[in-house]
Image (cartoon, rainbow, N blue to C red):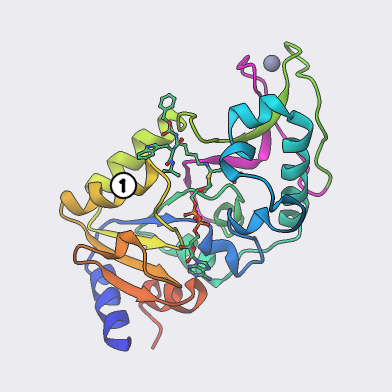
Amino acid sequence: MQGQIDLARRLVRDAELVAALSGAGLSAESGIPTFREALDGLWERHDPRRLASPQGFENDPAMVVEWYAERRRSLAGAIPNQAHDALARHERVVNLTQNVDGLLDRAGASAVVHLHGDLATDVCHAGCGFAERIDLADPPSLRACPRCGGAIRPGVVWFGEALPAEAWRRAEVVSTACDVMLVVGTSGTVYPVAGLVDLARDAGAQVIVVNTEPTPAGRGGAVELIGKATELVPPILDQTLG
Ligand code: BJW
Ligand code: ZN
């Protein structure tokens, strides 16, 4: 394992541009349940594809808003971990994240590309363009849009919805241009984001994967490091350590 960490460190040291593609595992050690874990307890009988979909919201908007309110309250007290900190302070890293928790931004990362939106915002489901920041500690219940009367929903990307166009364009540019793609804590099962790894690899980038278990991104010649993000990301990125 130490040999693999050293190899990853060398790849990062020699790279001009590192794209860090993160998922829920990055925030797991900040106490944020992964998407699948968020369906524990009361919610375990629900199909995630239904809860996190326009159809699920349209069928039972109050229930979906309550699921998000629970997750928002638990996020309010969370703090970024050492892996967020390392990703935020490395000047040659551009963060592309699927996470909606805002912890990379709270760690001080600049220009984070949010591919699946942000739990701290609400938007109008009717598409009138209304959007506002909400208080994570005191999330609103179901309410009507003050502009058009439509239903207000969390500003996140649900199954079957397009990703924010500008974020996606930036992610494609960075993935194509990077020398190294560092893939942290994502199962690599949700598209189109999962496809960015092949985009980077096909454009000549070296791929480094950090995950507690093997994932599809670790195939095809990647440096695959099995372990926790907080234990592996800082030593790979902080070239002054050890
Ligand atoms: C650790 C760790 C530790 C734990 N350290 N590691 C191609 C093929 C087939 C299907 C499709 C396709 N292209 C598109 C689709 C459909 C669909 C899709 O991908 N379905 C798949 C399930 C098959 N995709 C979509 O619908 C997307 N939209 C789209 O394609 O639009 C097309 C369109 C175009 C034009 C007009 C209209 C439409 C949208 C996808 C949106 C995903 N949204 C969610 C919910 C966000 C809001 C919320 O949170 O409620 O995003 S779903 C959920 O999955 C969330 C996550 O961001 C995303 C990814 O999950 P992630 O981050 O990988 O988490 P986990 O839990 O899966 O994995 C955690 C990992 O961490 C694990 O591997 C652990 O081992 C690891 N780990 N602790 C390191 N300490
Ligand atoms: Zn509206």
Residue 92 x %, y %: 34, 59
Quick one: 41 or 147, which is closer to the camera? 41
Which residue sits at x=31%, y=60%? Answer: 217
Residue 172 x %, y %: 30, 40
Q: What is the secondary structure assignment of the residue under circle 1?
A: helix
10 Å neighbourhood of mark 1: few (<14), some, or many (≥20)? many
Q: Which residue is mark 1?
A: 196
Answer left or right for 16 relative to 85. Answer: left
Q: Quadrant of the N terminus?
A: bottom left
Which residue sits at x=51%, y=35%? Answer: 159
Total marks placed: 1
Placement of 5 over or under 208, stated as above or below: below
Placement of 134 over or under 223, stated as above or below: above
Boundaries of the magenta span: 109-137
Which residue sits at x=41%, y=31%? Answer: 166
Residue 115 x %, y %: 47, 41
213 inside magenta stretch: no
Q: Is residue 123 visible?
A: no
Quick one: 46 or 85, which is closer to the camera? 46
Which residue sits at x=70%, y=61%? Answer: 78
Residue 196 x %, y %: 31, 47
Quick one: 122 or 215, which is closer to the camera? 215
- Residue lying furthest front: 45
Q: Is residue 184 visible?
A: yes
Which quarter of the figure has residue 13?
bottom left
Q: Amino acid at mark 1?
A: Leu
- Residue lying furthest top: 148
Placement of 170 over or under 212, stated as above or below: above
